[in-house]
Each structure stands twice: as C-alpha cells, then as structure tokens.
C-alpha cells in the first residue's frame, strides 16, 4: 500500500491533524511544529505529546514529518544563522519525543560571497551535534534561486556534512521549476540516475507531490492542484509506480479545490495514479 499524506493544519492541537489526515484518506502526515509566521518555538505539554503519539498509533498514521519555518537560513552569517540552528534543534528534539520522523527544511540563501557553503555546512553540523539519533534533518530541493536548486549543490552539502541523519525531500513542483524533466519514463529514469550519481537515491526520504502554476524552468515554485497545472500527470504516475520510488512516502501540499489546503479530492487524484 502506498504511503500518502498531506500537509495539514495543526489547529486544535497536533493530534487533531492526525485525525484530519485520516478523514481525507491519508496514512501519513506533515505539519508545522508551531506557527511558521515567526520565530516560534513549539511548546507542547507531556499530555499533548502523549495524546499525539497514541492518536498516531491508533489511527495508523506513519510517518509524520514537521515542515520547518520558512524563515530559517542556515547560510546566514549574522543573527538568523544561529537562530536557525536553535529553532531546528528545538524542533528536532521535540520530533524525537513525539515520534515524528524529522523536519523538512529549506536551507535559505547565500547573502554574501566567500565561504557561504562552508558556513552553511557548519551550521547544519552544529544542529546535528545537538539532536537525537532517531530524527532526520531533511533538505528540500528548491524551485527558486535559493540553496538546493541544483542537485550538485545538495550532493555537495550532504557529502560535506557526512551524517546519515541528513536526507532529502524532492518536490515535483520545485524540480519542474528548476528545469528537471521527469515527463516520460525514459526521462524520469535518467533523472533518477543523475540523482543517484550526484546525491544518492537511498537518501531520498520522501516526495512532495505538487503540480505547478508556472511553466517548466520558470524558477517560480507556486503549487497547484494535481492535474490542474503544468507539471503533467505522467510525472506523478512515474514517481508513484517506479520500482525505485514507489516505496517512498508521498506528501501533497496542494492549495485544495476550495483554496483551504490539501483535500480529499487531491488525495484521491494521487491514489488514482497507482497502477
């Protein structure tokens, strides 16, 4: 059975998000640990953590991922860099307590020339030094001109950091925006070979399955509902059926038919691609 989830609201508590996942047909979940609109460090009571764990187990929702705040920038050399380390360290310690697999992270952008890559990797290492061994630091590829746009860059970061807890989330909208062609079976297999050579296919933790509002190689990463954008339904079918990728979790972050976020319609569309 495919592992299919969605990024859902944590309104009412994280346990409520688990229930919402099941309500729309998911067996996996992605949530924020706290509001992503500021530098908010999630504070959960022991009772809230236990309720989340028991609800997740009772309803069979696994894995669960956090998505990190969009404010983090591990390449920043001033205040934001250390603050990013603090926030993600806190989030991943909480993830370990909650039985959450890890945090999916946009690394940020290089603001200055010079040793930006070295500084970025040092901040990632500082985070890894402070977190438990049972959670993952998951790098998401970029669809705009930020860190992680090119596979070569992701591979360089992972090789430099050299820690098995560092894994990768691939977003179909972002790959489309960055100019990676996944449209045919032959093209998709070429992409997988390239990814395996530059990064390592065994380091893929999950996929974000999103359509795109924008053209191929536009360097704009606006998500669209599945089948209503420019990515092409063949791409989603390739990923969810290929022997090298079909065992990965698939998480949707679509706007929803009513504009309120991922919904059962998008989940059912994704399930419809399974052969």
Image (cartoon, rainbow, N blue to C red):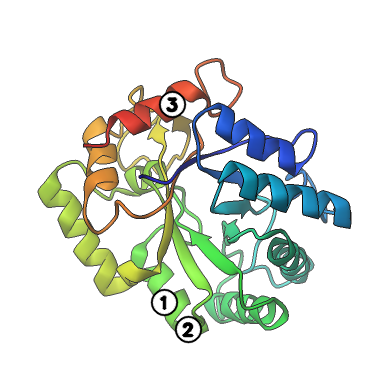
The local secondary structure at tag 1 comes to: helix
> In this rendering, would 173 be left or right of 54?
left
Q: Residue at x 22, y 44 (%)?
A: 238
The secondary structure type at the circle numbered 3 is helix
Picture coordinates of residue 222 (x, y %)?
A: 48, 34
Q: Earlier in the sequence, mark 2 or mark 3?
A: 2
Determine crowd level at label 2: few under 14, some 14-19, many 20+ residues with C-alpha closer than 10 A: some
Of all residues shown, which one is farthest toward the left?
Answer: 186
- Residue in the picture at 49% in, 31% down: 25
Residue 108 visible in the shown view: no
**Which callout, 3 or 1, points at the residue further toward the start of the chain?**
1
Where, by quadrant of the figure, is residue 149 drawn? Answer: bottom left
**Disc 2 versus disc 3: nearer the observer:** 3
Q: Could you tell me how far apart the alpha carbons at marks 3 and 1 are, in whole angstroms?
A: 34 Å
* Quarter occupied by residue 152: bottom left
Q: Quadrant of the image for the N terminus?
A: top left
Q: Is residue 220 above or below residue 248?
A: above
In the rendered image, which residue does mark 3 sit on?
266
Circle 1: is it few (<14), some (14-19), or many (20+) Cα within 10 Å? some
Q: Are marks 3 and 1 in contact (CB under 8 Å)?
A: no
Q: Which residue is the site of mark 2?
A: 160
Residues at discs 1 and 2 in contact (Cβ within 8 Å): yes
Q: Which residue is mark 1?
A: 156
**On screen, 76 above or below 128?**
above
Q: Are marks 2 and 3 in contact (CB under 8 Å)?
A: no
252 and 275: which is toward the camera:
275
Question: Furthest residue to the top?
Answer: 258
Where disc 2 sits, the SS reads helix
Seen in the picture, residue 113 relative to 24 is either above or below; the reply is below
């Amino acid at each position: 059975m495919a592992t299919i989830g969605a990024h859902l609201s944590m309104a009412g508590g994280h346990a409520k998000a688990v229930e919402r996942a099941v309500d729309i047909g998911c067996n996996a979940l992605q949530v924020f640990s706290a509001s992503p609109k500021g530098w908010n460090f999630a504070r959960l009571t022991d009772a809230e953590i236990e309720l989340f764990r028991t609800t997740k187990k009772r309803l069979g929702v696994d894995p669960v991922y956090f998505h990190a705040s969009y404010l983090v920038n591990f390449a920043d050399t001033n205040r934001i860099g250390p603050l990013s380390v603090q926030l993600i360290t806190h989030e991943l310690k909480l993830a370990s307590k909650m039985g959450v697999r890890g945090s999916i992270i946009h690394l940020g952008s290089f603001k200055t020339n010079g040793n930006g890559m070295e500084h970025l990797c040092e901040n990632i290492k500082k985070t890894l030094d402070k977190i438990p061994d049972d959670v993952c630091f998951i790098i998401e590829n970029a669809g705009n001109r930020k860190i992680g746009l090119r596979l070569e860059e992701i591979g360089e970061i992972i090789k430099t950091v050299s820690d098995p807890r560092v894994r990768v989330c691939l977003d179909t909208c972002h790959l489309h925006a960055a100019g990676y062609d996944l449209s045919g079976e032959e093209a998709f297999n070429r992409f997988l070979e390239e990814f395996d050579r530059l990064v390592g296919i065994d380091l893929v933790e999950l996929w974000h399955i999103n359509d795109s509002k924008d053209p191929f190689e536009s360097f704009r990463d606006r998500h669209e509902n599945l089948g209503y954008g420019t990515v092409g339904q063949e791409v989603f079918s390739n990923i969810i059926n290929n022997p090298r990728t079909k065992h990965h979790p698939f998480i949707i972050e679509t706007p929803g038919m009513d504009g309120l976020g991922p919904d059962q319609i998008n989940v059912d569309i994704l399930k419809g691609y399974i052969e």
